[in-house]
Amino acid sequence: MSATTTEPVTTTERPVPGRRRTGSLVWHIGSLLILAVVLYPVFWVIGASFKPSKDIVNSLQLFPGHPILDNFRGLADGIADISIWTFFQNSLLYAGGAVVGILLSCSLTAYAFAKIRFTGRNLLFSLMIGTLLLPYHVLLIPQYVMFQKLELINTYVPLLLGKYLATEAFFVFLMVQFMRNLPRELDEAARIDGCGHFRIYWSIVLPLCRPALITSAIFTFINAWNDFMGPLIYLNEPGKYTVSLGMMMFRDSDGVAANYGGLIAMSLVALLPVLLFFLAFQRYLIDGMATSGLKG
């Protein structure tokens, strides 16, 4: 007589379609609410730029019923006899110089840490990373005294000099980590062909590090364009002010904005270069280097 064994029958319950739709609906509603909170300041600035100054503070309406262009027309007259394009040119000079300095100095420094073996490399790299813990305001007074003794106040040298000396440890660290992941076979093949360090850096490493370079350029441009503390400390003449300092000139003697409409309109216009710069290079942010070294 054979014993029969019965295996337990396991049944998997399928999710209820109604419950799935409810969860998806809640997720989408929550995402839309978060998106509305994030985008509300942008819509407020756009709407306020088309309002009269008296309605910007008193009115709760997001977009005006009768939009006006007087705020933007007023920008053409300038601020205190200074054209707003002067502020934009100064900001472009500062931001462009900062991008060039960061890409050159930080990439060279990163190549040395990533590809060249020398005594004290790990110690110097650790000390460089440690500078990220130093607050900017701790170094502000010593730096100002130094540049004042060198008679470089009211110039762009204090703002740009550090960019060309690889003082931005974050970007050096970013490029070092990227370069360490590059195949060493490429360096060895280049050395067999007689290439030195500079040729390897310029012809092999830099093209492969394009995603890291573009990422550093975007963040550097945004930081320099929005920088307020640095120009406020080192620049004294209104003709050398950047956009961030130019908007401060809308204040009256009491420190209150005398022309809210012009201030909001200039704030909106000041966003355009950053937005265009980001849109022009955003595709490089997602570029990988996996196929870069395989192309002939």
Image: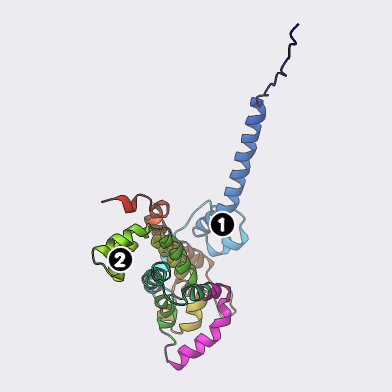
- The kind of residue on which mark 1 rests is Pro
Compare marks 1 and 2 and give the one earlier in the sequence.
Answer: 1
Question: How many residues crowd around disc 2 within 10 Å: few (fewer than 14), some, or many (20 or more)?
Answer: many
| Residue 180 image offset from top left, x and y in percent | 43, 61
Instruction: Identify the residue at the far front of this view.
Output: 1
Residue, disc 2: 200
User: How far apart are labels 1 and 2 at the CA level?
Assistant: 47 Å
Q: Which residue range is magenta in the image?
A: 127-152
Asked whether the viewer can see residue 77, the reply is no
Question: How many residues crowd around disc 1 within 10 Å: few (fewer than 14), some, or many (20 or more)?
Answer: few
Residue at image point 70% right, 21% down: 10
Numbered circle sitting on residue 41: 1
User: Which quarter of the figure has residue 54?
Assistant: bottom right
Give the answer, above or below, for where 123 lies relative to 43: below
Please state if 208 lies on the left or on the right of 54 as rendered.
left
- The kind of residue on which mark 2 rests is Ile
Instruction: Identify the residue at the far bottom of this view.
Output: 149
- Mark 1 and mark 2 in contact? Answer it, CB < 8 Å: no
